[in-house]
C-alpha cells in the first residue's frame, strides 16, 4: 500500500484523494493543479498563487535552475522554497522535457535527483524519455526500457523523504503503456505521471490521449496518484479526471497570456476579439476589454494570466464538487460540447466503460441522460451485467407499458438500460431522468440488455412490448422474442 495517497471519494474512475507530501509537511487534496513556475520568467508570484488562488503545490524545472548559474547558486544556498517564495509543496521536473525538445541534456538521473534533493524539492523526477506518439514499436520499446532502468536507478538514490515521480511512457502503444504502468507501480516510487501526452493535446488528439491514459491506468494500482504531465487547459480536466488523473500542471495560464489568449472551459479566445469578459473572477469583474487593451504589455499579460489561473482553479473545484455529487460524467458531457475533438475524447472515454465501471459507485444522487453518449455510461453496462444474475421464469413480459397478469412475470423495460424486475425501479441507475425524445443509442442499448437477458435464459419465453422502437434496435433483439408494438403499426413505415 502507498500510504501517502488516500482515496476519499470517487465517480467513474475519477477520485478525490489526499496526497501527503512529507518533506513539505502538507497534505494536498486531489484533483490538484500545479501551476508551472518558470524561475526565469515569473508571470504571477508564487506567493500570490497560494494567497489568491489557493495553490497548495506548484511545479518548477530543476534542470533550468541547475543550468542557470545565479539560480543554481541561490537554490543551493537558500533552497527552492526561498528562491521561489512559496512554502507549500514543490514538485520539480528533471529536464526530460528539454531532452524531448532539444535531443540532449547535460545531466543524469542520479545527478538531477541529488540536485533536486539538495535544493529541497518535495517531489523529484528522474530523467525519463518522453517518447512521442506514433514512433516505431522498436523505438517505443527501447526507450521504454531506458525509462524503466532509470526508475530502477532512482529507487537506489538516497533522497530522504523527498517523493519521486515514476513517469509512465510507451508512446501510443496501449500494451506498452499498460506494461509501463505495471512496472512503475512495482517500484517503490511515489507519484505516477503519464508522460509525453503534450504532443497529443497540442494536436487535439483527445481520443488518443484517453486511450493512452486508460492503458496506463490498467497497469497502475488504485493507490497510485496519477499526474497528467503537461496538461494545463481547463477544457480537458473533467475528461482526464474521469479517467483517473489526480494531478495536472499548467504552464498554459502563463504561455497563453503571453500570446494575449484568454482561457475558458470551452476553449481559448483571443482577448482582442472579446467585447465582453464572460467570467466573474476578480480580474474580469474589475476591468473591461477596453481597459485591458490600454494597459502596457506586461501588466496586460499579468492580468490575463491571473484570469487564466482563476478559470483553471475554478474548474478543479467544480470537478471536485461533481465527484462529491456523483455527476462528473455529466460535467464531462458538457465539456465535450466545446470542440469536436473533445467529443471524440468523451466517446473514447465511453469505450472504456468497463474499466470505469470497476470504480464507479453503485449508487449516486441522480443520472441525467443528456446525449446519446449517456447510453454508453458505465451504469448502463453494469445494469447489463447485473441481468446475468437475475432469474426470470416461465412466460415473461418485458414491457414499456402497463403490466399484465397474462404472464408468469411482468418486467419493465426502459431505454437505455433494458429490462428489470419492477421491484428494482426505485434503485439507481433505473431512477435516471430521461428526455421524452430518445435517440437511437438509447433504444439500441435497451435492446442489447433484452438480448443479454434472453440469451442467459434459454428456457424462458419472452415477449417485448415496446413503444415503437426503431428497426435498428429491434434488429438487435433475438428472433425468438415475440414483439408487440404498443403504439400499433399505425404509421405503417
Ligand atoms: N513534461 C511534459 N511531459 C513530460 C514527460 O513525459 N516527462 C517529464 N519528465 N516531463 C514532462
Ligand atoms: Zn476572469
Image: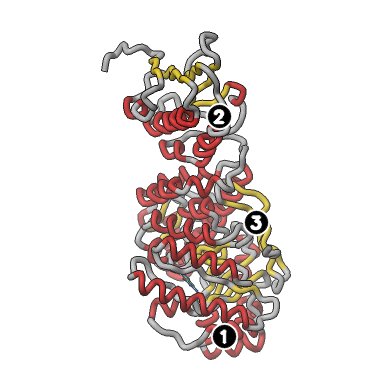
Helix, strand or loop at label 3? It is: strand
Which sits earlier in the primary sequence, circle 1 or circle 2? 1
Q: Is residue 204 left or right of residue 47?
A: left
Which sits earlier in the primary sequence, circle 1 or circle 3? 3
Q: Nearer the viewer, residue 280 or 205?
A: 205
Image point 43% across, 17% down: which residue?
465
- Residue 205 % position (x, y): 37, 57
Give the crowd class for mark 3: few <14, some 14-19, many >=20 residues within 10 Å: many
Helix, strand or loop at label 2? It is: loop
Q: Where is 25 relative to 217, above or below?
A: below
- Residue 181 % position (x, y): 52, 65
- Residue 249 % position (x, y): 52, 65
Image point 60% across, 71% down: which residue?
187
Q: Which residue is mark 3?
A: 17
Question: Which quadrant of the view contains residue 164?
Answer: bottom right
Give me the C-alpha separation between circle 1 and circle 3.
Answer: 30 Å
Q: Where is 444 relative to 113, above or below?
A: above
Q: Nearer the viewer, mark 1 or mark 3?
A: 1
Give me the C-alpha separation between circle 1 and circle 2.
Answer: 55 Å
- Residue 410 % position (x, y): 53, 17
Q: Which residue is mark 1?
A: 110
Q: Nearer the viewer, residue 398 or 299?
A: 398
**Can the viewer see residue 5 in this picture?**
yes
Q: Which mark is residue 31?
A: none
Helix, strand or loop at label 1? It is: helix
Q: Which residue is mark 2?
A: 430
Rendered-image quadrant of the N terminus: bottom right
Image point 62% across, 83% down: which residue?
157
Amino acid at each position: 500500500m502507498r500510504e501517502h495517497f488516500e482515496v476519499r471519494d470517487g465517480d467513474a474512475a475519477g477520485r478525490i484523494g489526499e496526497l501527503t507530501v512529507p518533506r513539505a509537511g502538507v497534505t494536498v487534496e486531489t484533483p490538484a493543479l500545479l501551476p508551472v513556475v518558470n524561475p526565469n520568467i515569473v508571470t504571477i508570484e508564487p506567493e500570490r498563487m497560494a494567497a489568491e488562488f489557493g495553490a497548495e503545490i506548484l511545479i518548477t524545472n530543476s534542470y533550468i535552475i541547475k543550468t542557470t548559474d545565479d539560480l543554481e547558486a541561490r537554490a543551493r544556498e537558500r533552497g527552492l522554497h526561498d528562491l521561489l517564495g512559496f512554502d507549500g509543496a514543490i514538485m520539480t521536473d528533471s529536464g526530460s522535457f528539454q531532452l524531448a525538445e532539444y535531443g540532449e541534456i547535460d545531466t543524469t538521473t542520479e545527478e538531477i535527483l541529488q540536485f533536486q534533493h539538495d535544493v529541497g524539492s518535495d517531489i523529484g523526477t528522474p530523467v525519463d524519455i518522453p517518447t512521442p506518439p506514433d514512433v516505431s514499436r522498436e523505438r517505443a520499446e527501447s526507450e521504454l526500457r531506458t525509462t524503466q532502468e532509470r526508475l530502477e536507478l532512482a529507487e537506489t538514490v538516497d533522497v530522504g523523504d523527498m517523493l519521486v515521480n515514476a513517469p509512465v511512457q510507451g508512446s501510443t502503444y496501449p500494451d506498452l503503456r499498460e506494461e509501463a504502468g505495471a512496472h512503475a507501480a512495482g517500484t517503490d516510487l511515489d507519484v505516477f505521471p503519464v508522460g509525453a501526452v503534450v504532443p497529443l493535446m497540442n494536436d487535439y488528439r483527445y481520443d488518443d490521449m484517453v486511450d493512452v491514459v486508460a492503458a496506463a491506468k490498467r497497469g497502475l494500482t488504485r493507490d497510485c496518484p496519477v499526474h497528467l504531465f503537461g496538461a494545463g487547459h481547463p477544457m480537458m480536466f473533467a475528461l482526464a479526471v474521469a479517467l483517473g488523473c489526480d494531478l495536472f500542471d499548467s504552464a498554459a495560464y502563463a504561455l497563453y497570456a503571453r500570446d494575449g489568449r484568454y482561457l475558458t472551459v470551452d476553449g481559448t479566445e483571443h482577448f482582442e476579439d472579446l467585447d465582453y469578459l464572460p467570467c466573474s473572477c476578480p480580474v474580469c469583474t474589475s476591468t473591461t476589454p477596453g481597459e485591458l487593451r490600454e494597459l502596457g504589455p506586461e501588466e496586460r499579460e499579468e492580468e490575463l494570466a491571473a484570469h487564466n489561473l482563476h478559470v483553471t482553479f475554478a474548474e478543479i473545484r467544480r470537478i471536485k464538487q461533481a465527484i462529491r455529487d456523483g455527476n462528473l460524467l455529466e460535467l464531462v458531457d458538457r465539456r465535450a460540447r466545446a470542440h469536436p475533438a473533445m467529443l471524440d475524447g468523451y466517446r473514447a472515454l465511453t469505450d472504456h466503460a468497463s474499466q470505469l465501471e470497476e470504480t464507479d459507485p453503485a449508487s449516486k444522487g441522480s443520472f441525467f441522460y443528456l446525449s446519446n453518449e449517456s447510453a454508453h455510461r458505465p451504469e448502463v453496462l453494469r445494469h447489463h451485467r447485473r441481468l446475468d444474475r437475475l432469474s426470470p421464469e416461465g412466460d415473461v413480459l418485458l414491457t414499456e407499458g402497463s403490466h399484465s397478469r397474462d404472464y408468469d412475470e411482468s418486467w419493465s423495460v426502459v431505454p437505455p438500460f433494458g429490462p428489470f424486475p419492477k421491484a428494482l425501479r426505485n434503485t439507481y441507475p433505473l431512477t435516471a431522468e430521461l428526455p421524452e425524445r430518445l435517440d437511437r443509442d438509447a433504444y439500441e442499448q435497451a435492446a442489447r440488455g433484452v438480448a443479454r437477458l434472453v440469451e442467459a435464459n434459454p428456457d424462458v419465453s419472452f415477449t417485448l412490448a415496446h413503444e415503437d422502437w426503431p428497426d435498428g434496435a429491434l434488429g438487435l433483439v433475438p428472433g425468438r422474442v415475440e414483439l408487440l408494438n404498443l403504439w400499433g403499426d399505425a404509421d405503417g413505415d
